[in-house]
Image (tube, rainbow, N blue to C red):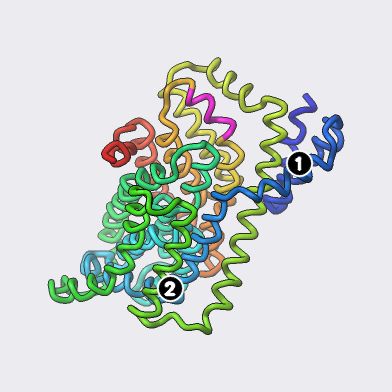
Amino acid sequence: MEIYLPIIMLFVLFLLNVPIAFSLIASSLVYFLFINTSIPVSLVMQRFISSASSFPLLAIPFFIMVGSVMNYSGISRSLLSFADSLIGHKTGGLAHVNVALSTLMGGISGSANADAAMQSKILAPEMTKRGYDLPFTAAITAASSSISPVIPPGINLIIYALLANVSVHEMFIAGYVPAFMMALSLMVTIAIIARRRNYAPSRTEAAPAKERLHYLGKAVPALLIPFGIILGMRFGLFTPTEAGAIAVLLCAIIGLFVYRELKISHVPAIFKETIQGTSSVMFIIIGAMIFGYYMTLEQIPQNVASALILVTDNKLVLLMLINLLLLIVGMFIEGGAAMIILTPLLLPAVLNLGVNPVHFGIIVIVNIMIGGVTPPFGSMMFTVCSILKVKLLDFVREVLPLLFALLVVLMLLTYSEGLVMFLPNLL
């Protein structure tokens, strides 16, 4: 029983709101210092250091930098204008623009929290000026930000590919259909609520074709970035790691020479934001790798997989149980940490029953993104509520219909592998 003490300790530390990385490392050290003393501590420390030496992990700081460069380059404002020209005339127009902007930005920023923070500062104030209730605005902003990491180059797509040893570019391609399904489900829900509450559109009539083409022309350079990355990897021009550097370069060129809003004076702030974001993510990954070392030594993933198969050998029932587990865990643990901890535990079980690992990766990522909007510890929920000064209970009341819409999409993705694998199977 003592071999499970680090796992119990990990959840206790999470509930005490101890930072994720420290929780993972402390729980691991309890095992190596007090339970399994046959392994020298020096070997554990060596593994701690070597965990950060993986070449594919270089993709993470590059894609974090992409989000920072984008915020200073004028890309976000260009995409906002384009989204507004397309659907701003609909009832609840700005709410639809909120979702559309997250979808358009997803291929560039790849970070839910970055998207939630940006829209809370740029779009949410305009929505409240137009008569939208502040809690409803916060709920839409948080829910729509769940789309960003599902569209390449989402950081969670890269992390899952490393954990599951699957192709990064397959994960990237597989993200498009689920992301657009999430966007559509949110827009349908928003349309129903907006009609009931009589939320006005952001513009009195549909934008003329000339205006739409104008904003499309301005947005094209930004929209081409994710497709350029995918095509470059598909034809072997660069690796997923190198794709991050290419994306930074493309965003910088667009910001400097197309939109002309990126300045040399922005460089220190960009590097500061990148270092802060990278250090927190990498610290969690390293802690999770040490924790994974402990679980591997004790064969816990194999035991969990065997236990799940004993419960049921039906693939559909197993996926439902895993969805319920991930949703419950996602209510209490930050999504990225939940994915890093649970993927090595759950993957062997689903592979034994013939589930495609790429399909399972999308299920996991969509699941943890829903968890990021769900009380009591959803990270996007906290980001939006803290910036907009919204009470948690007010947020929960408004976000429930949007969560239901996302859960419907999750069920469709879970039980229809063809939806997820349609694009990867074409390439």
Look at 29% across and 73% down and name the residue there: 81
Judged left or right of residue 51, residue 369 is left
Find out whether residue 403 is within the magenta segment.
no
* Residue placed under numbered mark 2 in the picture: 252
* Residue placed under numbered mark 1 in the picture: 27
Q: Position of residue 202 (x, y in %)?
A: 27, 73
Q: Position of residue 366 (x, y in %)?
A: 44, 44
Mark 1 and mark 2 lie on one chain; the one further toward the N terminus is 1
Label 1, secondary structure: give it: helix
Foreground tag (1 vs 2)? 2
Q: How far is the residue under mark 1 from the one under mark 2?
A: 41 Å
Q: Is residue 200 visible?
A: no
The amino acid marked with disc number 2 is Ala
Look at 37% across and 49% down and name the residue there: 236
Label 2, secondary structure: give it: helix
Above or below — where is 103 with respect to 404? below
Q: In which quarter of the image is residue 416?
A: top left
Judged left or right of residue 249, residue 92 is left
Q: In which quarter of the image is residue 272?
A: bottom right
> Which stretch did the figure color magenta?
344-351
The amino acid marked with disc number 1 is Ser
